[in-house]
């Protein structure tokens, strides 16, 4: 088990992560793993409006094949993946999400 996986396991045991369900579009078995989930507000249009930038982070060893336009369910809410990218040395991934 890698260091990132150990950190995520510890965070999940402490109740710091959210449960995420991904049903791959290719029809393979659904996967459920704990993820870091953030919904920070951001201002747009020179501060005239605010928007929420949803994102999730997870170990690179889970959700293999997660791609843009796939959907995930976090806390009963459906999100569509906008993009995914590796963080740091590639052992952690971050996905930008849009609430559906």
Image (cartoon, helix red, strand yellow):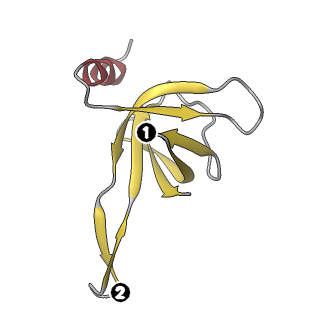
Q: Which residue occupies 32% across, 18% down?
A: 9
What x and y, as percent, mark residue 43? 29, 76
Mark 1 lies on residue: 75
Question: What is the CA distance from the residue labelled 2 to the residue labelled 1?
Answer: 30 Å
Q: Are marks 2 and 1 in contact (CB under 8 Å)?
A: no
> Which mark's residue is nearer the viewer, 2 or 1?
1
Q: Quadrant location of residue 66?
A: top right
- 12 up-or-down from 21: above or below: above
Query: Dot 1: what SS?
Result: loop
Mark 2 lies on residue: 45
What x and y, as percent, mark residue 10? 26, 18
Q: Quadrant location of residue 34?
A: top left
Task: Name the residue at the top extreme.
Answer: 1
On screen, residue 82 versus residue 75, left or right, reads: right
Task: Name the residue at the front extreme.
Answer: 76
Q: Which residue occupies 33% across, 54% down?
A: 39
Quarter of the image that includes the N terminus: top left
Q: Classify 10 Å Cα crowding around label 1: few (below 14), some (14-19), many (20 and above).
A: few
Q: Which residue occupies 65% across, 34% down?
A: 23
61, 50: nearer the viewer: 50
Task: Name the residue at the right extreme.
Answer: 27
Reading the chain from its start, which is encountered first: label 2 or label 1?
Answer: 2
Quarter of the image that includes the C terminus: bottom right
What x and y, as percent, mark residue 38? 32, 49
Q: Classify 10 Å Cα crowding around label 2: few (below 14), some (14-19), many (20 and above).
A: few
What x and y, as percent, mark residue 74? 46, 40
Q: Which residue occupies 51% across, 48% down?
A: 84
């Amino acid at each position: 088990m890698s260091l990132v996986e150990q950190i995520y396991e510890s965070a999940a045991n402490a109740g710091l992560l959210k449960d995420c369900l991904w049903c791959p579009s290719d029809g393979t078995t659904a996967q459920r793993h704990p993820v870091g989930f953030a919904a920070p507000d951001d201002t747009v249009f020179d501060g005239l409006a605010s928007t929420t930038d949803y994102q999730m982070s997870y170990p690179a060893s889970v959700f293999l094949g997660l791609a843009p336009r796939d959907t995930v369910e976090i806390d009963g809410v459906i999100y569509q993946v906008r993009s995914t990218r590796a963080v740091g040395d590639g052992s952690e991934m971050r996905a930008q999400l849009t609430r559906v």
